[in-house]
Each structure stands twice: as structure tokens, then as C-alpha cells.
Amino acid sequence: MKLWMQKLTLLLVIVGLLLLVAGCGKKVDEAQIQQDITEGVNSFKTAVQAYNVANMLGFLVKDVSFKLTISEGNGSYYKNYTTLKTELEEDQEKQLHWRQSPPEGHGYVLIMELGTIIFSNTSASGAIATVPFKIKELAQEPEIPQDVTDEGQIVCEMVNLQGIWRCQKMTIVYYVSDKTSAGARNTKSGEEAAQGFCFGLFDLH
């Protein structure tokens, strides 16, 4: 009887150790996930500033599951990956022209400043990253001093696709402001105004 109890105790210890090892193997490395997503968000920011279409799209899931929501005040506009890609590509020539130095272009600069990223619902397969942002714009020709033209927050629903983090759903919320800078549009609401991601207000000619 005593021998049987010893064998049972040993068996329970072994089972416990196996469960402990298995549990450790499944532990989510949140720090690494946050680092990887942060790198992706920063790469997206760099692409927005340079208007690099390929790199902006590279941050996203490139299929029908992607959805972009743009909201300002009571207005919202939605688009899928194909629509967004088409709009970004259509605007690319103009945006890159603006960024050239005068006299070829306008010496236009868009600066995107990001606040602290807040992570939630983090798992090995997905996470939500929320980050406040501020857009500053300036131009040399015509001469328009640097000014804050947009503020808001971006909510990215991230998914892990074969070890690479991509944004599957993006919601950009623009804070409503009565302020309008020289050379700026007034609103982002409506299908015609809501082109691409809508970062920035300048409309140079």
C-alpha cells in the first residue's frame, strides 16, 4: 500500500511538472509583441511623412478583411484595402511633387508626431494599439509657416500573420477644430474629401 502511494505521488509530481512546462511554453511575450508592433507603427509614420505608398500599405493586411474608418465629429467614412490603395496611388504624383524643393515643387513638409502607444487585448495572435497623433505642415512656396493642422488618435487592430504584425482594422479619429491654416481644406467628412488616410489639410496648387 505504501509503495502504491509513493508511485501515485511520483506520477502526480511528473504530471504537475509537465503541465508547468507546457504552461510556460504558451506564455505570451507581451514585451516583444509591443516592441514589434511599435516598430511597425513607427515605420508607418515614416511612410506617411514621405508619402511612400508601398510602405504605408505594407503596414496593412492586404486582403478583404482590412477596413479603414475615418471619423471627424459626427461624420464617418469607410473604405476597404482596394479603395485605399487606389486613392493613395492616385494622389502619389501630386504629393511627391509638393515635397520637391522650389521651383520644381512647393517644399512641402508633413510631420507626424506620435504619443505613447497604449496596448490592449494582447495575445500571440492579435493586439489593439491606440496612439494619439499630431500633424504639422509647412511649405516654402507659397511660404506657409509650420502649423498644427490635425490632431486625433489611431486605433489599430493588429494580427500576427506568419510572425509579422499587420493592421487589419484601422480607425482614425480626428478631433474637431475650428482652426484652419493658410492653404488648408476645412473638413475631412464626405467621400470626396476623405481621400487616402486624410493626414494633413494643405491643398497646394
Image: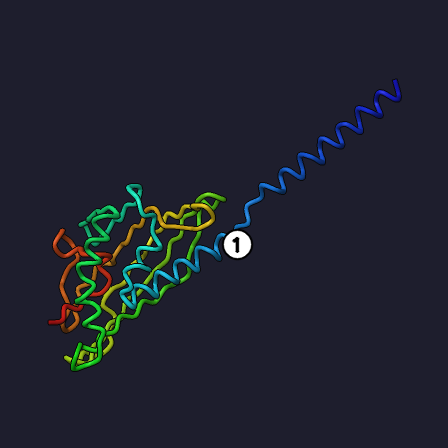
Left or right of 88 in this view: 122: right
- Give the percent coordinates (x, y) of residue 31: 53, 54
In this view, 1 is above or below 11: above
In this view, 165 is above or below 18: below
Q: Secondary structure at mark 1?
A: helix
Q: Residue at x 44, y 55 (%)?
A: 37
CA neighbours of label 1 inside 10 A, class few (<14), some (14 to 19), many (20+): few
Query: What residue is pinned by disc 1?
Result: 32
In front of the other: 168 or 132:
168
- Give the percent coordinates (x, y) of residue 2: 89, 21
Quarter of the figure with residue 193: bottom left
Quarter of the figure with residue 92: bottom left
Q: Residue at x 58, y 44 (%)?
A: 27
Q: Amino acid at mark 1?
A: Gln
Q: How is the image coloured?
A: rainbow
The answer to whether residue 179 is seen in the rendering is no
